[in-house]
Image: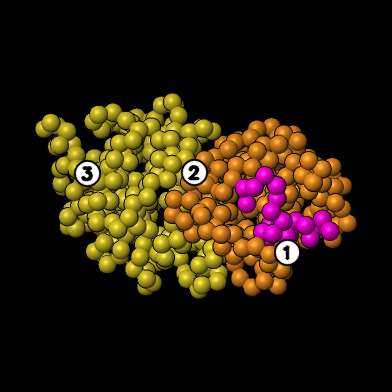
Chain colours: A orange, B yellow
């Protein structure tokens, strides 16, 4: 894991449609990466984030965007892929207590694995993920030691690494940033956050009560910037 | 990585419909594992191996069998998921020279990632894969060091490992066996190899000329046993 890669400048980026991956795309773009986006339709509650991922990708000028479909809802295990309720109205202390039901088993591992396959095919040495380990919901697959272990595995898994001498880097530019820092950085880089979607629920407007909405609102507040998505929805 | 796990006796097993995973299932069953099978429809050339995986799973008495669908053919990179020709009529020396076009980028990483998700949900500590590094086609993701790296990553990736204290083991019972040893072991355990399918091509009968057919034929020959699949097709 590097904070910045010294390899070729082609990168696969996991784009969820949320504000983190939108910011990661903008940072990578500003550093000269040519971006190959990949998004996932995996049985999540709503398609809104995929529409947003498409818009974010177009806005970031990705050269190609693949959407991979599969169904993680079939075996349950998460409130994001089943009819279980997502937790609402939790403050930071409660969020820090445990891993919430919105955890999806092995999600980032599956996403990064497809990202690795895509990277091998398009000739990209870098896989970018908008994971951050500060203001997040406690997911184990957003931590540095996990991402480093994925990278080690990736460099033993592929023909590109074992025969062709390529080296894969998992690049997580937001890893040590707070939500407010992410937003400030994105604003500086011109990210249009009205294109992004964070809410776990598939309503017409963000619920404002799930962990993801709360973390987003706190981030915008701490950054001293109004959330253009909320303004957009409030103004109609 | 263990050669045998000392954890709970629930295991997810990757079942391809080939002879290796059928033998791995029989070995695990004989060791008392309760098997949760997972197979993949990933854009491979033909559905025959999935039909065989179903039959092998039923024959091994798996308690549940999930098939996960996604399309790896969309971005190419392999003769198994595209219209590229598979290599034919190669001897062992030629097979050892390089990784063939039948290599599918990051395939086992994607398969094992889904296996990990499934294992976390059903409460299995072990993920079984029929990889073997002796008589294989040179795929990097069939080697011990790769499987160990996947296991290390898995134990950092999941709620089960990081919060609940579970430990995932990738168990590859065939890793150091020759094809002949695999077949002999399977015969001893009563595996019905007429249920399995190895040929890379989707013809009505095995082509006998792709690497997979050649390795299978050499394995049966060295084991001194006729291949019941060939007998079956020859007799009608």
Residue B101 locus on image (x, y percent):
45, 34
Separation (CA) of disc 1 from disc 3: 51 Å
Do the residues at discs 1 and 3 belong to one chain?
no
Identify residue for label 3: B195
Q: Position of residue B62 (x, y in %)?
A: 28, 56
Using the rendered image, report if marks 2 and 3 lie on a common chain. Answer: no
A209 falls in the magenta region: yes
Confirm whether residue B44 shows in the render. yes
- Give the residue drawn at x 17%, y 33%: B233
At x 24%, y 51%, the residue is: B58
C-alpha span from label 2 to label 1: 29 Å
Residue B70 x/y as whole percent: 47, 40
Query: In the image shown, does B74 or A224 lie closer to the viewer?
Result: A224
Q: Mark 2 vs mark 3: give the one in front.
A: 2
Residue B18 horizontal side relative to residue A21, left or right: left
Residue at image point 77% right, 57% down: A217
Question: Mark 3 — on which chain does it sit?
Answer: B
Q: Earlier in the sequence, mark 2 or mark 1?
A: 2
- Locate the N terminus of chain B by quadrant: bottom left
Helix, strand or loop under label 3: helix
Pinpoint the chain carrying mark 2: A
> How far apart, in angstroms, are the residues tagged by discs 2 and 3?
27 Å
> Which region of the structure is painted magenta?
A201-221
The answer to which quarter of the image holds residue B90 is top left
Can residue B4 be found in the magenta stretch?
no
**Residue occupied by mark 1:** A134
Q: Is residue A106 visible?
A: no
B47 up-or-down from B38: above or below: above
Above/below status of B38 relative to B154 = above
* Image marks 2 and 3: residues in contact by CB distance under 8 Å: no
| Label 2 packing within 10 angstroms: few (<14), some (14-19), many (20+) | some
Q: Which residue is mark 2?
A: A70
């Amino acid at each position: 894991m590097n904070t910045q890669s010294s390899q070729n400048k082609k990168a696969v980026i996991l784009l969820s449609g949320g504000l983190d991956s939108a910011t990661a795309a903008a940072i990578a773009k500003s550093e000269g990466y040519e971006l190959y986006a990949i998004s996932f339709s995996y049985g999540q509650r709503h398609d809104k984030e995929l529409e947003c991922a498409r818009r974010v990708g177009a806005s970031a000028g990705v050269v190609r965007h693949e959407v991979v479909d599969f169904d993680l809802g079939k075996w349950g295990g998460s409130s994001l892929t089943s009819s279980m309720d997502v937790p609402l109205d939790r403050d930071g202390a409660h969020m820090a207590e445990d891993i919430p039901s919105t955890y999806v088993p092995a999600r980032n591992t599956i996403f990064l694995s497809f990202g690795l396959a895509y990277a091998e095919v398009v000739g990209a040495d870098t896989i970018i993920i908008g994971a951050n380990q500060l203001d997040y919901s406690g997911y184990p697959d957003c931590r540095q030691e996990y991402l480093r272990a994925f990278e080690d595995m990736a460099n033993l898994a592929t023909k590109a690494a074992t025969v062709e001498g390529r080296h894969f880097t998992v690049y997580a530019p937001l890893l040590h940033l707070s939500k407010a820092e992410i937003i400030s950085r994105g604003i500086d880089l011109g990210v249009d956050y009205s294109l992004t979607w964070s809410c776990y629920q598939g309503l017409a407007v963000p619920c404002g009560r799930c962990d993801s909405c709360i973390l987003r609102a706190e981030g915008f507040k701490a950054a001293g910037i109004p959330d253009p998505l909320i303004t957009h929805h409030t103004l109609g």
